[in-house]
Image (spheres, grey):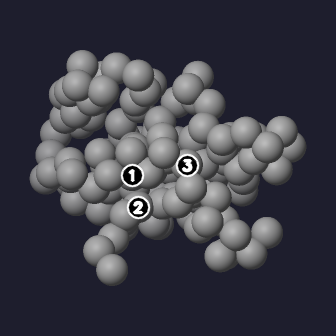
Amino acid sequence: MTDNRFKELIAADKDMMTILTIIASLPLRDAWLAAGAIRNFIWNQLAYGIGFDADTDIDVVFFDPSLPYEANQVVEDFLNKKFPNYRWEVRNQAYMHSHCPNTEPYLSTCDAISKYPERCTAIALRRIDD
């Protein structure tokens, strides 16, 4: 699959674009849609010709060491209340190294994603202004 085809599939899906817009509106530094939501979307497109799967967790990742670990849950609760049609999971990558023994702290969201153990989930998207 080419980069352009990948972008076309994402842009053509209402749910994926809505999710990316919601994430872009959050007051989080370096925030991205990541991992399984993207992997599952592409798999569904290629294997079955369908798009977004509402049963997929929406992994929102960001990097902000100035926020306490508990902020993950605050943001996640907000998203689940305001947008209950999606299954939100929010993780500040500044703290995720502590879940893996002998792992150095990550430097950014992209640094954390580059170290995901499954290559097929080491992917992220975000909206940027043209």
Neighbours of disc 2 within 10 Å: few (<14), some (14-19), many (20+): some
Residue 109 position, x and y percent, is 40, 61
C-alpha distance separating marks 1 and 2: 6 Å
Residue 65 position, x and y percent, is 21, 54
> Label 3 near label 2: C-beta < 8 Å?
no
Q: Closer to the N terminus: mark 1 or mark 2?
A: 1
Residue for badge 2: 126
Q: Closer to the N terminus: mark 1 or mark 3?
A: 3
Residue 71 vs residue 44, the one in the foreground: 44
User: Does residue 60 appear in this view?
Assistant: yes
Residue for badge 1: 20
Foreground mark, 1 or 3?
3
Quadrant location, the N terminus: bottom right
Quadrant location, the C terminus: bottom left
Residue 76 vs residue 5, the one in the foreground: 5
Q: Closer to the N terminus: mark 2 or mark 3?
A: 3
